[in-house]
Amino acid sequence: MGGGYALDVALQEPTLAATVINYGHLATDPEDVKKFEAALKQAGQSADLKIYPDAGHAFENPNN
């Protein structure tokens, strides 16, 4: 959920220099993520996306 908020703020706040989306419901398919990155770059934005294909849901939760 926080990743969605981070994206919303990034789209609405022109003075924001950068955003990091770590968790949140955005695109979950790696091909959709690549399309998102391409759209950012086509819009003149820099993007540094990382895809970890073997990371499961809640991969940062220490109880998993």
Image (spheres, helix red, strand yellow):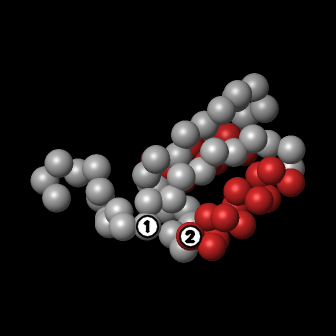
Dot 1 crowding, Cα within 10 Å, few <14, some 14–19, many 20+:
few
Q: Is residue 61 above or below residue 15?
A: below
Give how far across and how far down residue 61 sits, in percent: 23, 51
Residue in view at x 70 percent, y 29 percent: 16
Say whether residue 30 is left or right of residue 13.
left
The amino acid sitting under disc 2 is Pro
Q: Which residue is mark 2?
A: 30
Sequence-wise, the earlier of marks 2 and 1 is 2
> Could you tell me which secondary element the residue under label 1 belongs to?
loop
Q: Nearer the viewer, residue 54 or 45?
A: 54
Q: Nearer the viewer, residue 28 or 7?
A: 28
Give how far across and how far down residue 20 sits, in percent: 55, 40
Dot 2 crowding, Cα within 10 Å, few <14, some 14–19, many 20+:
few
> Could you tell me which secondary element the residue under label 2 belongs to?
helix
Say whether residue 22 is left or right of residue 34.
left
Residue in view at x 60 percent, y 37 percent: 19
Q: Is residue 44 above or below residue 26?
A: above
Give the quadrant of residue 33: bottom right
Question: How far is mark 2 from mark 1, CA to CA?
Answer: 8 Å
Say whether residue 22 is left or right of residue 43.
left
The answer to whether mark 2 and mark 1 are in CB contact below 8 A is yes
Residue 64 at least partly seen: yes
Residue in view at x 29 percent, y 56 percent: 59
Residue 5 at least partly seen: no
The amino acid sitting under disc 1 is Pro
Q: Which quadrant holds the C terminus?
A: bottom left
Give how far across and how far down residue 21 sits, in percent: 52, 46
Residue in view at x 35 percent, y 63 percent: 55
Give the quadrant of residue 17: top right
Q: Which mark is residue 53?
A: 1
